[in-house]
Image (cartoon, coloured by chain):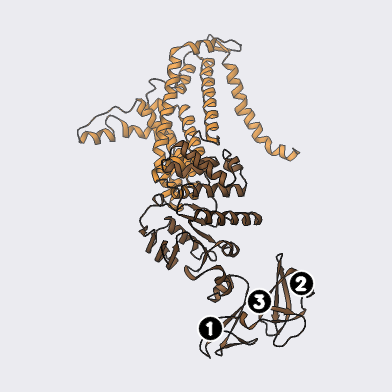
Chain colours: A orange, B brown
Amino acid sequence: MNRFALVFRLPIIVWQGLFFLGPLFFMIAMSFFLVKNYRMEEAFELKNWARMLTRGYVWDSYWYTLGMAGSATVVATLVAFPAAFALAFRVSAAVRRWVIFLLIIPFFTSYLVRTFSWYVILAESGVINTGLGTVGFGPYTMLNTPFGTVVGYLTLTLPLVVILQTVALANIDRNLVQAARNLGCSPPRTLVSVIVPLAKTGLIIAALFCFILSFGDFVAPYYLGGSKPPTLPILIIDTTKSGQQWPRAAVVAVMMMLTLFAIAATAIWLAYRRRSAS
Amino acid sequence: MKDPLVVLSSVVKRFGTFTAVHRLDLEIAQGEFIAIMGPSGCGKTTTLRMIAGLETPSEGEVRISGRLMNDVPVHERDTPMVWQSLALFPFLNARENVEFGLRMRGVDTVERRRRAMEWLERLEIGAFAERSVDTLSGGQRQRVALARSLVTEPRILLLDEPLSALDAHLVIRMQGVLTRLQRELGITFVHVTHSQSEALAMADRIVIMSEGRVVQIGRPREIYRTPGSRFVAEFVGRNNILSGVSRGDAIETALGTFPAAGLPAPGRPATLVIAADLVEISQAPRDGAIPCSLISEEFVGATVTLFLEAADGTELKVQVPERALGELNQQAGSRYHLSWPADAGHALTET
């Protein structure tokens, strides 16, 4: 590597070192620290780990978060697919560009603002319940429920999933789709036997993004899910607030990172695996 | 034609305001090897795709075995196609690609595998059955694509310039494979190509298309020796095309008057076509020979094409065997004399 290459790379190396690797190692180290009289002391003890890993409420929260993020991923994938399919195969390239532009617009406003706007729609006296009330149904409780959490997760992730799926589907070689039809494959079967396998990598990456964003999200489960039960990000906030337990919060954070690492590695392995198990 | 398999009658295909195929009439016999040939954009691929059902005719009828196919969806026709890009499924191995059509027809796993292997063996790529198609060579991929199309035992095979991406020596080998298969199976092959050597080498009949219309249909020798129009004369082979006026049994051109048969009434404009390989060239002046000077030559191996210019600027072409070149001692600007036998000229009624 010549001197200039190093100079050009230096900013990103320094940035990553200072603001990603440094804090990461500090957080891992901190999970072994102790808190005495509301003050954190440097130490190397397994007490935090032992405590957090043996508490039922931690594991309840862990499985709940995993389940909610997983549900959001399944729902987002299924809801996004018809839209992405239509954008990739049924509309012109010009329409596709416009719709992708429109799908980016939600990211212009704060996610928090978009989350609060759901209050108007989901509340006991909100748009949906008022509408259902006029035909004799409800009211249904939608705020402060797991349903509310999933709605929030989808607000965050759905536009992104649609965009990623659309790109994956639009890049499929149309000749392969026509070749399948030509060999006697009906349209619904072409979807399952040819289009999904061809778009597999992009579809899995889209789902992975949805999972990662949902798993680490604090806003949706807190404001729309009512933090009951708390998800892991809420648990981290609660733990830091109660008795300055930063080391215990660090344990939860490391648990989350390891989980995401394992899931991302599996997803990428699945996404890029060449041969299907047929 | 007795027992035609495919009949296209008055077929028109429009894409928006562009008409790709104009009122096409074509009958393809059972067991025939037909080549559809023409320059890019002549409508040959659109015609093929209408037989496969990948395009719906805007007007007219497509019939296969007498059945009207216009509204039969692609997957319900038995018209497999070998694609220019081959369109092998990258997520399946060679054998699974071949099995695809059988799987769609609900053939059980054991039978499916047996028939796929049979075809892979037949095309001499049995050893590569479990290989990913990405790791196969161009020729091997070609064979997988052929096996995939033929494994369902169709009555017709559509070929959309599948040889165009192959190296020259592989093209010749695949031509051999295709011709042999077509003879053995006795099924109809419809081969779209822009390569005249492919069409001339393999087809029973050649359909020449230009701007969405059929301009000539005939056996390869007919097309090659007796082009029906100036377009075909220019497109197929290497021809000298001279415009002139009919004198009844001869045509008067800027280079002289030459005898020819089949000319229009005296005084009408006419065109004379002389194939470059029928022209005789010598350094010594001969009676009635046209003096020319050499401009350039095109060396393609066994035959060499010489481009010459007559005194009035008319360009003439001569094809000579490479081994006969030695005596000519050709150099740019050298003077030669050209002539052709009286029966070499072929008259066109159009100009």
Is residue B291 rendered to the left or right of residue A118? right
Q: Quadrant of the C terminus of chain B?
A: bottom right
Q: Which disc number belongs to residue B262?
A: 1
Sort mark 3 into few (<14), some (14-19) or many (20+) by Cα contacts within 10 Å.
some
Q: Are marks 2 and 1 in contact (CB under 8 Å)?
A: no
Name the subunit of mark 2. Answer: B
Residue A104 visible in the displayed image: no
Examine the rendered structure and indicate whether residue B82 appears above or below residue A209: below
Sort mark 2 into few (<14), some (14-19) or many (20+) by Cα contacts within 10 Å.
few
From the image, tell me which residue sits under label 2: B325
Name the subunit of mark 3. Answer: B
| Residues beneath discs 1 and 3 located on the same chain | yes
Residue A133 visible in the displayed image: yes
Name the subunit of mark 1. Answer: B
Examine the rendered structure and indicate whether residue B172 appears above or below residue A278: below
From the image, tell me which residue sits under label 3: B278
